[in-house]
Image: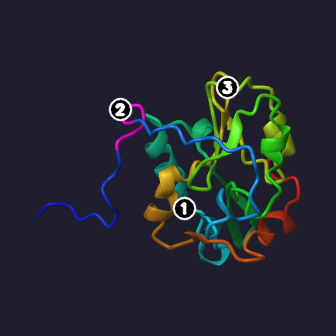
């Protein structure tokens, strides 16, 4: 009998001939949580800490979606143990709970909001200055081996971390007021 998997099939890693088209860049900031053009609120990744067991499947799914092999330094989200009874996924809110400080701090405009509402990094334009992570209230911007910025790109609208989380501890939906309060409230400065 073949093994049974509860997970959807894994996507090819970006380094295996699969490359997402670059999102068009927009420098005008729409209201929080809204994509350019004032359309409906953009979907973002919303952590649900009451459901999180700290298993790390979200980190592995993110890794597989973006790179070949295991590369923890290139994960686009972070898993924190805030208390004995609280594991928390910390991820970019794409403007739903911040003022897009990373976009404003980037001196070369390498960070912008794409057409689907995701805040994305143009890695070719990034100069590795680090201003974006210093400005981000959640400090979710990481750096690759060349020092260039990496952050959640919502996997082109189908976040793998959400898809593979069996406990549904992270959701892809429109944010509500207060959805990200726990990310700030219990650890201002965590992850710096």
In the rendered structure, are the residues bearing label 1 and label 3 in contact, judged by CB atoms less than 8 Å apart? no
Q: Magenta stretch mostly in which secondary structure?
A: loop
The residue to which callout 2 is attached is 16
- Looking at the image, which is closer to me, 168 or 105? 105
User: Which residue position holds label 3?
Assistant: 125
Give whichever of 158, 183 is nearer the camera: 158
Location of residue 163 by image quarter: bottom left
Task: Identify the residue shown where x is 44% and y is 62%.
Answer: 164
Q: Secondary structure at mark 2?
A: loop
- Seen as rendered, the residue at the extreme left is 1
- Cα separation, mark 3 vs mark 2, equals 23 Å
Q: Is residue 160 above or below residue 25?
A: below
Mark 3, residues whose alpha carbon is within 10 Å: few (<14), some, or many (≥20)?
Answer: few
Q: Please name which of the two marks, 2 or 1, marks the residue nearer to the observer.
A: 2
Residue under pointer 1: 55
Q: Which mark is residue 2?
A: none
Q: How many marks?
A: 3
**Residue neighbourhood size for the residue with mark 1, other residues' Cα within 10 Å, grouped as few (<14), some (14–19), many (≥20):** few
Q: Which SS class for mark 3?
A: loop
What is the image's colouring? rainbow
Residue 63 relative to residue 88: left or right: left
Figure check: 183 above or below 22:
below
Q: Which residues are magenta?
A: 12-18
Q: Residue 132's x, y, as percent?
A: 80, 39
Q: Residue at x 85, y 39 (%)?
A: 105
Mark 3 vs mark 2, foreground winner is 3
x then y, percent, for residue 160: 47, 56
Pick whichever of labels 3 and 2 is earlier in the sequence: 2
Where is residue 65? Give x, y as percent. Answer: 45, 45
Asked whether residue 71 is drawn in magenta, I would say no
Of residues 25 and 72, the one nearer the viewer is: 25
């Amino acid at each position: 009998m073949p093994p049974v998997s509860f997970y959807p099939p894994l996507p090819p890693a970006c380094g295996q001939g699969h490359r997402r088209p670059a999102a068009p860049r927009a420098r005008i900031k729409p209201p929080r949580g809204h994509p350019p053009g004032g359309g409906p609120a953009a979907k973002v990744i919303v952590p649900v800490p009451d459901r999180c067991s700290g298993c790390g499947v979200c980190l592995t799914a993110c890794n597989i979606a973006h790179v070949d092999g295991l590369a923890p330094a290139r994960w686009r989200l972070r898993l924190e143990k805030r208390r004995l009874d609280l594991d928390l996924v910390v991820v970019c809110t794409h403007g739903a709970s911040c003022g897009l400080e990373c976009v404003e701090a980037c001196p070369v405009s390498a960070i912008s909001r794409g057409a689907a509402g995701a805040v994305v990094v143009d890695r070719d334009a990034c100069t590795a200055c680090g201003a974006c992570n210093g400005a981000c209230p959640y400090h979710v911007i990481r750096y690759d081996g060349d020092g260039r910025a990496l952050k959640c790109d919502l996997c082109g609208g189908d976040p793998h971390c959400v898809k593979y989380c069996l406990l549904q501890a992270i959701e892809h939906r429109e944010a509500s007021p207060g959805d990200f309060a726990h990310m700030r409230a219990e650890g201002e400065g965590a992850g710096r």
